[in-house]
Amino acid sequence: MEALKAVSSEPIHLRSVLEQLLKDFGTPDIKIVTSIVDQWEEIVGVDLAAKISAVAVSGSDLIVRVDDPVWASQISWLENQLLEKITKLVGEEKITSIRVRTTPK
């Protein structure tokens, strides 16, 4: 973790430390994550956004949450289309798959 290696009397911005930690874990830049979450409704559409939430990024996987297994199946059918839209938004090879977590209401 480069951000923590250098010993300095100067304060370190928390954001830069967090960004370095995310980078060390192979997670895309925080701007990529926030772009996806902020524009989720545009990516999936209003109807699906009401049922499916983008909640995290782990490595190159986008983690989405659904409350019904039926919606998990829907994501698997739409995964390629969604990945194309996400690639247009954040760039090539940042997000390469979508993992679904089902959490009942």
Image: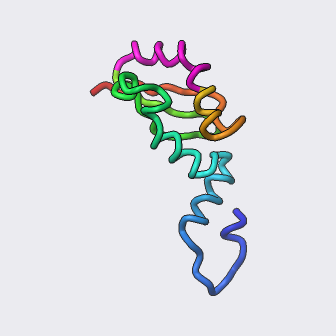
- Residue 87: quarter of image: top right
Q: Residue furthest bottom?
A: 9
Where is the N terminus found, in terms of image quarters? Answer: bottom right
Which image quadrant is residue 5 in? bottom right
Q: Residue at x 56, y 27 (%)?
A: 98
**For the point 57% across and 60% down, which residue is it?**
18
Q: Quadrant of residue 47?
A: top left
> Nearest the camera: 52 or 87?
87
Magenta segment includes 69: yes
Q: Is residue 32 magenta?
A: no
Q: Which residues are magenta?
A: 68-82
Image mark count: 0
Magenta segment, prevailing SS (helix, strand or loop): helix
Q: Report the side of 1 relative to 89 (left or right).
A: right
- The x, y position of residue 4, in whole percent, is 66, 70
Q: Residue at x 54, y 45 (%)?
A: 33
Q: Nearer the viewer, residue 35 or 75?
A: 35
Given residues 29 and 47, the one toward you in this image is: 47
**Percent coordinates x, y for residue 28 in the rendering:** 64, 46
| Looking at the image, residue 11 lies above or below residue 74 | below
| Residue at x-position 69% and y-position 80% | 7
